[in-house]
Amino acid sequence: MNQNTSFKRYLKMDLLPTPWCPGCGNGIVLKTICQAFDELNLPKNGTVVVSGIGCSGRSAGYFDLDSVHTAHGRAIPVAEGIKYAIDALNVIVASGDGDLLGIGGNHLLHAIRRNTNITVVCYANETYGMTGGQVSPTTPHNIKTLTTPNGNPDYPLDVQFLFKHSGCYFARSTVYHLNHLKKCIVEALKFQGFSFVEARTMCIVNYGRRLGYKNSNEMLLHYKEFYKINDDAGELAPNEIGIIKTNTLIKS
Ligand SMILES: Cc1ncc(C[n+]2csc(CCOP(=O)(O)OP(=O)(O)O)c2C)c(N)n1
């Protein structure tokens, strides 16, 4: 199969289009996960995708693999259960920041503690997209959302710090930086232990338009201009994307 289209073998092409709004970045994350699977030639009958609830959670059903669409926030423990039951499987979680860091945050902490050998790709759009654009754990300070019309009084969770001293893998990228995002996912899949990729992605309809973006392309251009790649970092600045080298993390 042609190198550029062979990733499609991991997708249920007959189910397309997805239910996501025009301009949503989720499709880019979904495609990039499939490209990472393709690069590693993951066996379709040996790979499982698990998601929680949310727009991004809908991605599980579009993989042409065994997949589980769990209850809200419960993707990680279900994925861990699958991995502990059948170690030979590649187990990947694909879900949103609200799902994984909000209602599911407790499970994330314990997956890090256990260093379970699964990969999580977090569609981090800084909002609860499916339910209309409420504030989420990753919404920046002062940003206006449906539930913070005067600006978010809280500060966002900087996810990388949950991983400090864990011995796990953490990477951050965006849907603008396609090759970098794919590299982050490929390296995560190769990592023997718990790996987490924070994929910054845009929700124009329920988030970006409240911030004054006219379209999702403007949000993409913001990623292009704001983020700098720093793959050798022990820690990422707010405007940096990269892979935190696991050898900079000390397992206590
Ligand atoms: C137990 C429970 N609480 C609340 C909801 C409502 N709900 C559905 S999706 C969602 C937020 C999802 O946000 P996120 O994970 O960021 O995904 P996105 O839609 O932004 O991709 C919420 C709160 C639910 N379905 N179940």
Image: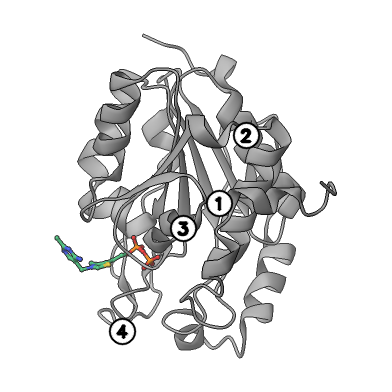
Which marked residue is nearer to the observer: mark 1 or mark 2? 2
Residue 35 in the figure: left or right of residue 163 = right
Q: Earlier in the sequence, mark 1 or mark 4?
A: 4
Say which mark, if any, is on residue 124. 3
Whether label 2 touches label 3, CB < 8 Å: no
Mark 3 CB within 8 Å of ligand 1: yes
Q: Earlier in the sequence, mark 1 or mark 2?
A: 1
Q: At which x and y percent is residue 7? A: 70, 49
Residue picked out by circle 4: 150
Q: Is residue 244 placed above or below 2 in the rendered structure?
A: above
Q: At which x and y percent is residue 146? A: 30, 83
Say which mark, if any, is on residue 243. 2
Q: Secondary structure at mark 4?
A: loop
Q: Quadrant of residue 215?
A: bottom right
Q: CA distance from mark 1 to mark 3?
A: 14 Å
Which marked residue is nearer to the observer: mark 4 or mark 2? 2
Residue picked out by circle 1: 238
Mark 1 CB within 8 Å of ligand 1: no
